Image (cartoon, coloured by chain):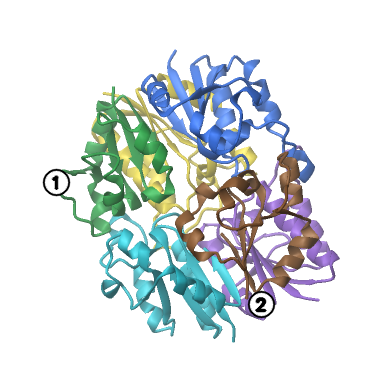
Chain colours: A blue, B cyan, C purple, D yellow, E brown, F green
Amino acid sequence: MINVLVLSQHSPFDDLYIRDALDMTLIFAAVEQNISWLFTGPAVLALKKQQQPEHIGLKNYFKSIKTLEIYDVENIYVCEKSLLEYGLDKNNLLVPVKALNYQQQHHLISQQQQIVTL
Amino acid sequence: MINVLVLSQHSPFDDLYIRDALDMTLIFAAVEQNISWLFTGPAVLALKKQQQPEHIGLKNYFKSIKTLEIYDVENIYVCEKSLLEYGLDKNNLLVPVKALNYQQQHHLISQQQQIVTL
Amino acid sequence: MARFVLSLHSAPSDHDATQRLIKFADACLSSGHQIDAIFLYQHGVFHASKQLNLASDELPINSLWQQLYDQGVSLMLCVTAAEKRGLDINNTGVFSVAGLAEFAMLASDADKWVQFK
Amino acid sequence: MARFVLSLHSAPSDHDATQRLIKFADACLSSGHQIDAIFLYQHGVFHASKQLNLASDELPINSLWQQLYDQGVSLMLCVTAAEKRGLDINNTGVFSVAGLAEFAMLASDADKWVQFK
Amino acid sequence: MSTLHIFSKPLSYYNTDQLVNLIQPSDQVLLLSDACFATTQFRQLARQLLILADDAKVRDIAINKPDLALSYDDFVALTLSTSHSITW
Amino acid sequence: MSTLHIFSKPLSYYNTDQLVNLIQPSDQVLLLSDACFATTQFRQLARQLLILADDAKVRDIAINKPDLALSYDDFVALTLSTSHSITW
């Protein structure tokens, strides 16, 4: 089992970036690797509650993010500074997360075998 | 005849952005509109001399930029601050340009009927 | 009544930009304005790929284009941008293959050109 | 000898990233390393479009992929990413259609995963 | 002579320095898509922000004074009441 | 335990604040493609920059000390001498 980190930096509806990252995260969990997902910058907005893109014809992928726990993806991290930037409260997101400062993000990175930015 | 501005903001080998802007600039000249092309941010690097991308297999589109004068495209503008940022001298670029500060860029924009960012 | 041209610069995978352009076009028409052309440029050319076939819970891109086409809106694929991206310009469905010059003339004639990306 | 997996994330129109991945792959092989897979993901999936056909003064993308294929490198198209982008997954030439799970297993096994974009 | 500036991503996607210096008080700033998340960031570009109502609503974003919610019909009208638009 | 940070665009494409705080003195910073134009900008991330020689050369960019020119073979070796890479 290796440690793999998916790093997201794009906003929720910037092309399919977050959806690609979601797929990648779920699949590494499925093949039983120790997967972590880190949201930084505008990517943290993908964890904002009560978004309903289906009302403008877009797929509601937030429902799948909510299922991460069911698939044993527990290591979900967000950049503390980015939460502040977008006025989000870490205790009121779609899923439970750990908020990290830059030093903690560096520590997380240092523990990985593979890192993929999506 | 209307005033049309092409606004470039991408670096020279970021996908085909500059090449698309070049095509658009040339075609508006060909259909006899008053075309201007403004380079800002890393796009100013597309005017740097002596680039030879053919040596790594990429098309040398800088040769076509040099032909802009032949096609009567004379209104080539660059952001003064961006030149400074990338250490370029406005008198030593591929083609003659006018360097503009932000106020002058705003004035240029205010004179246009259509503006396209590419 | 005003005359518009619209251009789409992002790929079909940018569903959000696509639905926005379509809704803007619908609002133009229902407000009594005219759309002289919708032009696919840059990554937008992939909308004319004959392969485009999305899952049923995704934005129904093909039928949205068909609806605009049925209302008589001229949907144009930029041949220069398409060829630079290796797209097959035969068999482009509701999109007509057009030169950049044709679009530039339409854009010069129109009251407004609005880009979507 | 090390084992690599490489992934390509940008479209064929990003000629620069494409030539860089190919040269990195060549250097891997000539240094005696092994490439377990080159994986097309995100906009990279468009490299497997059967339409891809560029002008003669452009990067000869098709023949570069063919050369890697002829050297026995496994070129994989991510089926999930392809379907989300409406790409036809029949007739993908030198690229084999693979599930994300297959790639994830290869990436977990490899010494190094290097992304190109 | 006012310009309509159109954004669809948070401000970090753009060159803030350029925008702060280019955009004039007489210009209009319209937020679409993921730009709607970032009203606080865009406030430095304009006192009043125009926001596409549909895009704000699906993201559960409230539009408060002095900002203005726009329908698609309003968006069309806005492109006609300004001299030209720039989609950044 | 050092990380290889790979860039292919000028620094303005990235989140500078994040990078300045994440990248450590023991890490390596490699510039490819259009990132080669921006050695001055990337200097704030590392004392010594590694630069792909081919990409610098076609852009007519000189590589000066303390920076280091890399061949593709060097690039491959670098991915093996670091713990992992991040292609930003």
User: Which of labels 2 and 1 is toward the front?
Assistant: 1
Residue F5 appears at what percent x and percent y?
33, 36
Residue flagged by tag 2: what amino acid is it? Leu
* Residue A44 versus residue B2 in the image, above or below: above
Crowd band around label 1 with a 10 angstrom C-alpha radius: few (<14), some (14–19), many (20+): few
Q: Does residue E63 appear left or right of residue B86 in this picture?
A: right
Q: Dividing the picture into quarters, in which one does residue E79 lie?
A: bottom right
Residue D5 appears at what percent x and percent y?
40, 30
Residue E2 appears at what percent x and percent y?
63, 71
* Marks 2 and 1, how far apart at CA: 54 Å
* Residue E62 versus residue C32 in the image, above or below: above
The chain identifier of the residue carrying mark 1 reads F
Which residue does the image show at 38% across and 25% down from the upper left?
A103
Q: Which element type, helix, strand or loop, lies under badge 1? A: loop
Would residue F46 be visible to someone looking at this image? Answer: yes
Which residue does the image show at 67% across and 81% down from the upper left?
C109
Q: Does residue F3 appear left or right of residue D52 in this picture?
A: left
Crowd band around label 2 with a 10 angstrom C-alpha radius: few (<14), some (14–19), many (20+): some
Residue E13 appears at what percent x and percent y?
51, 49
The chain identifier of the residue carrying mark 2 reads C
Residue flagged by tag 1: what amino acid is it? Lys
In the image, F42 versus C13, the foreground residue is F42
Task: State the residue position of label 2.
Answer: C106
Q: Dividing the picture into quarters, in which one does residue C115 lie?
A: bottom right
Task: Report the quarter where the N terminus of chain A lies.
Answer: top left
Task: State the residue position of label 1.
Answer: F65
Q: Which element type, helix, strand or loop, lies under badge 2? A: helix
In the image, D107 versus A53, the foreground residue is A53
Disc marking residue D108: none
* Residue A24 versus residue B89 in the image, above or below: above
